[in-house]
Image (cartoon, helix red, strand yellow):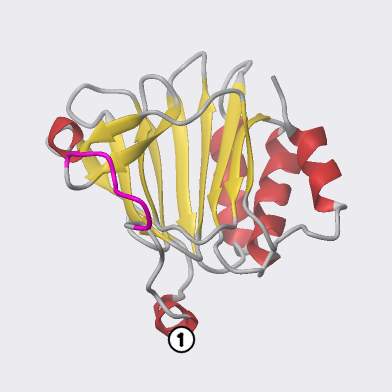
């Protein structure tokens, strides 16, 4: 199922950017840090990676996602994944690197997930839109805006994103409320680098 048309309808509404927008076929499942930490890699802010499923590096973890944007593009046929976490609009060079990698896939069946953006700045979504326009994946999950820090796990075997439980338990109410100020975040902004 492709939710892109739903996203475009929501984007046209006046409240777009002011309230959380969560479009998905089902709620995100939780995974404990103890379950995934020895079978994956950590994707920090302003990093991108191209991965294929393997037991040793099955998971891509992304902790403390606030104002930045997490985008995954997964090929169901080959388990080839592109996972990005960026705080600035993607440069033409970064977009070209991603699209070149995706175009090398033979008859891909692509799924895209877009998560993050706590402030009203929708500029980063233009990079996700350019990725969508160039690769034509199915948008299967969109979770943007809101006031909670997100900790995520991307599974390269299933192509799914899970909530990462850093304390190996379900979070209490308001425990994920963001405390990072816009100034702190702006100091961490940088160009996307590929690992």
Q: Residues within 10 Å of mark 1 (few under 14, many from 20)?
A: few
Q: Is residue 14 above or below residue 49?
A: below
Q: Is residue 67 left or right of residue 150?
A: right
Name which residue lies at 40% across and 20% down: 158
For the residue pair 195 and 154, the one nearer the viewer reads as 154
Name which residue lies at 67% across and 56% down: 125
For the residue pair 50 and 103, the one nearer the viewer reads as 50
Q: Position of residue 63 (x, y in %)?
A: 31, 54
Q: Secondary structure at mark 1?
A: helix
The quadrant the N terminus occupies is: top right
Which residues are the magenta region?
168-174
Q: Residue 79: within the magenta?
A: no
Q: Residue 170: within the magenta?
A: yes
User: How many numbered discs, if any?
Assistant: 1
Q: Is residue 64 above or below residue 107?
A: below
Q: Position of residue 11 (x, y in %)?
A: 81, 51
Write down the quadrant of residue 37 in the picture: top left
Q: Position of residue 50 (x, y in %)?
A: 41, 39
Q: Is residue 63 left or right of residue 38?
A: right
Q: Position of residue 46 (x, y in %)?
A: 42, 63
For the residue pair 36 and 91, the one nearer the viewer reads as 36
For the residue pair 175 and 68, the one nearer the viewer reads as 175
Q: Is residue 59 left or right of residue 88?
A: left
Q: Is residue 30 left or right of residue 101?
A: left
Name which residue lies at 27% across and 39% down: 170
Q: Main secondary structure of the magenta part?
A: loop
Q: Which residue is mark 1?
A: 183
């Amino acid at each position: 199922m492709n939710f892109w048309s739903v996203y475009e309808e929501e984007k046209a509404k006046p409240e777009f950017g002011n309230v959380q927008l969560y479009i998905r076929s089902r709620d995100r499942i939780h995974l404990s840090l103890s379950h995934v930490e020895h079978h994956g890699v950590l994707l920090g802010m302003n990093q991108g990676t191209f991965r294929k499923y393997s037991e040793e590096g099955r998971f891509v973890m992304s902790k403390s996602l606030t104002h930045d944007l997490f985008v995954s593009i997964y090929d169901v046929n080959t388990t080839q994944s592109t996972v990005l976490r960026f705080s600035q609009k993607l440069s033409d060079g970064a977009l070209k690197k991603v699209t070149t990698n995706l175009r090398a896939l033979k008859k891909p069946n692509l799924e895209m997930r877009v998560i993050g953006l706590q402030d009203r700045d929708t500029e980063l979504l233009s990079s996700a839109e350019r990725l969508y326009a160039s690769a034509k994946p199915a948008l299967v999950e969109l979770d943007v805006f809101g006031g909670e820090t997100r900790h995520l796990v991307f599974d390269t075997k299933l192509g799914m994103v899970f909530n990462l439980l850093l304390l190996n338990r379900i979070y209490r109410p308001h425990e994920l409320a963001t405390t990072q100020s816009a100034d702190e975040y702006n100091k961490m902004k940088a160009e996307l680098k590929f690992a």
